[in-house]
Each structure stands twice: as C-alpha cells, then as structure tokens.
Image: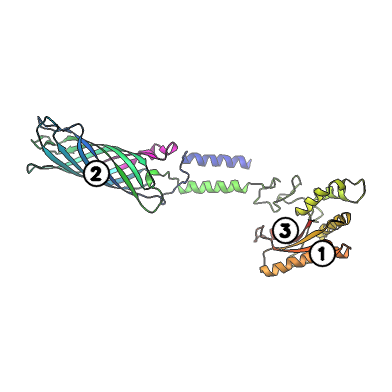
C-alpha cells in the first residue's frame, strides 16, 4: 500500500512539471538572463509614399542592435536601435532617405509558453512589441522628421550552442506623427499612426552570463516542486528491501537476513532463545547436522552448511569493550565446534570485529582479542591449533555509528570455513 501511495504522489509531481527533454531542471537563479542581438536584412515601406516614388520589394537594407534582459524564462525587456535605408526602385523617381529609431519592447518567449521543449531543444520563438522614437532624414535636403512609433514582431530561433543562436525576424512598425512621406518628397498630412514599415532580418543572438544556459532554453521548475520530488525520491529509496524480508532497508537492523527466514518488525531473524542463530535456521541445522552417521542427510549438505557459516549467519557476540562472549551467544561457538569435529579435515578463520567507538588502533586490538578468545575456547575443546586461524578485522563501519542497537550487531566474531 505504501508503494502504491508513493507511486501516485510521484506521478502527480511529475505531471505538474510537464514532460520535457531538458535533463536538468532549473530554478530562477541558475540560468543566464542577458543577451546581445545583432541583425540585418531588407525592408519595405507601405505608406506614405509620394506619387511617382517607390522602393523595391523588398529593398535594402536594415540593421538592428538590441540588448535583452529576461525576468524569467518567459518574459523580458529589450532595448534596441534600428537603422533603415530607403532608395528608389528602377523606373521611379530617385530619393535617398534614412530612418533611425530607438525602442523599448516587451518580449515573450513563445517557445517556453507553448512548451516547445516537449519536442525540441534547438528551435525557439520570441514575440516582441513596444514603443519608441524615430527620425526620418533626407540625404539631399534638410528634412528631419521626428515621430513616435509602435512596433511588433516575431523572432524565430535556432540554437547553435549555449552561447549563440541564429535568428530570423519579421517586424511591423507603425509611425505616429509622421509629417513626411518615406521618400521625403512631400508632407504626409496625417498625424495618427499613418506610417507603415515592414522589416525582415536575419542575425545572431549572443548569450551573456556565467551559467550554462540562457532563459530562452530552460524549463523552470519551482523549488518547492523540486523539494517534493527529492522527498519522493528519498521515500522510494527508503522503501528498498535488499534482502526481501518485508522490512525496508532504513528500518532493517539485519540487512542480510537469510531468504525465507521469519523476521521481526526491525528485520531481525526470529531468535527466541537469544543465541544469535535464527530459530528456523537453527532448527534446520540441528535437524540435518546433529550427529555424524552414514545416514545423516547433512553429509550431502556440507556445502550448504559451509556457505551459511561463511555468510556470517553463525556468530558469537560481545558486550561493549569486552573480549569475552556473551552468555547467550556461545552456542555459535558450539555450532562451529560440532562442524569441526564432524569434518576433521576442515579448518576455520576466526574473524574478530569491533564497532567504531574509540580509536581505530584500540579497536584493532580488541577485535584480535575477541577472535583469540574464541580460539582459546576451541583449543580447550581439543581442536588442533593448526586448524584455527585468528584474523583481526578491526572496526565494522557498515552500520549507523550513532545507533547503540546497530553497534551491537557488529561487536562479534564470525567464521570462514576453509
């Protein structure tokens, strides 16, 4: 049930973030916001033009320089300077005028608003609109016509790298209070938004800043959503049950329980007689390996018994800072003694362990003393010394150092049959 609930929570969190191909989800402070834009291209004057005057369709040329700042990955501001040159087309009256403008525009990242990231990370689309001031100048007279303007357009983007993007832009400019025609041959006679000019340009955008990506190309995830996802991930990790005993690893005080052995709520094998051998395992071992006879089934299970011993399932335990086994754990030694008696060619490594409390050098000596103590018990039981090898494993840092209950599990001696 827990796993099912967590699965639904995780799915909900992912849904709120929407599908995306961007592998790194970003918050508001880890992307660049400034850029410089340079473009050039062609233009077409729509009106007003004096009778007998016209420009080519389209006509050269346009230059544009802009500086943009994005408040987030969807909206920003741009200040830009533009220059247009107007000359006659073949077969019409000659003229030579220039148009200069300065504008402040709002910018909308339509690519992010429309979730382009769900299907591409290299194509973008910006919308922009704003107001400014302009001046039309005639190169052959003293005409200098000052006016206001409104402009709006769309900019397509192709990302070449995290620092450079190619752009293609189409913009419409409306001039207000334009006193002269674009050819400067006559006055226009209209004070409203009478002037219309179309610009088409291609250019580059250079992204500035110390971060890897610019706002144009990132998908922002709220920090609270990221925190929720991290919590869900942590919960999923906590539910991992490595030894599949039904107790999650973070609660499991015995993370390597023998498969199929009954455990308590802390993942420890049931051991009612407190001899540190799981009751089910002990019952099986005693039943199959109780004595050496020709009919004993254990004779065909020696490899199994050896694997269980070498896996650390037979051990003897010690109190803190002690080298004498606890009374309830001596049956582990008895079990090894029985095995060695029934297998006279076998030898055993006696491996001492200590917890992490205290200095490492002291714990090395303590682990050796514990193994030596077990060896002395086996020697007194008439096991030949040549069959017994003491190993000091020192500190065992596989459990939580701050948990007294966990530290009890590593104050032990284990065995390895050879």
Q: For the magenta stretch, what is the residue range?
A: 107-131
- Residue 138 vs 329, above or below: the answer is above
Residue 105 in the figure: left or right of residue 124: left
Which SS class for mark 2? Answer: strand
- Residue 211 vs 59, above or below: the answer is below
Which residue: 65% across, 58% down? 400
Which residue: 84% across, 63% down? 386
Callout 2 crowding tier (Cα within 10 Å): few <14, some 14–19, many ≥20:
some
Observer-nearest of 298 and 180:
298
Name which quarter of the figure residue 387 lies in: bottom right
Which SS class for mark 3? Answer: loop
Which residue: 38% across, 54% down? 210
Q: Does the magenta stretch include residue 117?
A: yes
The residue wearing badge 3 is: 409
Q: Does the magenta stretch include residue 33?
A: no
1 and 3 marks in contact (CB < 8 Å): no
What separation in Å lies between label 1 and label 2 (alpha carbons)?
89 Å
What separation in Å lies between label 2 and label 3 (alpha carbons)?
74 Å
x, y percent for residue 209: 36, 52
The residue wearing badge 1 is: 375
Residue 128 in the figure: left or right of residue 364: left
- Residue 399 vs 97, above or below: the answer is below
x, y percent for residue 151: 24, 39
Q: Which label sits on residue 34?
A: none
Observer-nearest of 207 and 26:
207
- Report the quarter where the C terminus lies: bottom right
Which SS class for mark 1? Answer: helix
The residue wearing badge 2 is: 64
Instruction: Decide if residue 115 is in sight here.
Output: no
């Amino acid at each position: 049930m827990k796993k099912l609930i967590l699965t639904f929570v995780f799915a909900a969190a992912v849904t709120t973030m929407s599908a995306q191909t961007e592998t790194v989800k970003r918050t508001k402070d880890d992307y660049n916001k400034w850029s410089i834009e340079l473009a050039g291209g062609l233009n077409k004057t729509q009106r007003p033009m004096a009778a007998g005057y016209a420009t080519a369709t389209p006509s050269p040329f346009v230059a544009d320089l802009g500086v943009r700042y994005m408040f987030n990955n969807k909206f920003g501001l741009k200040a830009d300077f533009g220059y247009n040159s107007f000359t006659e087309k073949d077969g019409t009256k000659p003229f030579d005028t220039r148009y200069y403008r300065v504008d402040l525009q709002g910018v909308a990242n339509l690519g992010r608003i429309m979730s382009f990231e769900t299907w591409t990370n290299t194509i973008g689309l910006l919308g922009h609109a704003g107001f400014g001031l302009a001046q039309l100048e005639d190169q052959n007279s003293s005409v200098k016509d000052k006016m206001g303007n409104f402009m709006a357009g769309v900019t397509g983007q192709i990302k070449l790298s995290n620092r450079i993007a190619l752009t293609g832009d189409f913009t419409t400019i409306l001039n207000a209070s334009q006193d002269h025609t674009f050819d400067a041959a006559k006055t226009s006679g209209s004070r409203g938004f009478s002037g219309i000019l179309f610009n088409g340009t291609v250019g580059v955008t250079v992204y500035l800043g110390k971060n890897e990506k610019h706002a144009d190309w990132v998908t922002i995830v709220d920090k609270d959503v990221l925190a929720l996802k991290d919590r869900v991930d942590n919960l999923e990790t906590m539910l991992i049950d490595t030894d599949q005993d039904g107790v999650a690893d973070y609660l499991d005080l015995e993370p390597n329980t023998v498969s199929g052995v009954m455990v308590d709520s802390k993942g420890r094998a049931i051991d009612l007689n407190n001899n540190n051998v799981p009751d089910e395992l002990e019952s099986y071992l005693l039943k199959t390996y109780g004595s050496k006879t020709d009919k004993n089934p254990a004779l065909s299970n020696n490899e199994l018994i050896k694997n269980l011993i070498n896996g650390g399932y037979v051990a003897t335990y010690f109190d803190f800072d002690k080298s004498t086994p606890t009374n309830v754990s001596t049956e582990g030694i008895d079990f090894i003694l029985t095995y060695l008696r029934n297998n006279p060619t076998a030898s055993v490594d006696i491996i001492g362990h200590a917890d992490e409390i205290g200095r490492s050098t002291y714990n090395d000596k303590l682990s050796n003393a514990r193994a030596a103590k077990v060896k002395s018990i086996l020697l007194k039981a008439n096991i030949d010394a040549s069959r017994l090898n003491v190993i000091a494993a020192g500190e065992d840092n596989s459990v939580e150092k701050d948990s007294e209950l966990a530290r009890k599990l590593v104050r032990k001696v284990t065995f390895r049959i050879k």
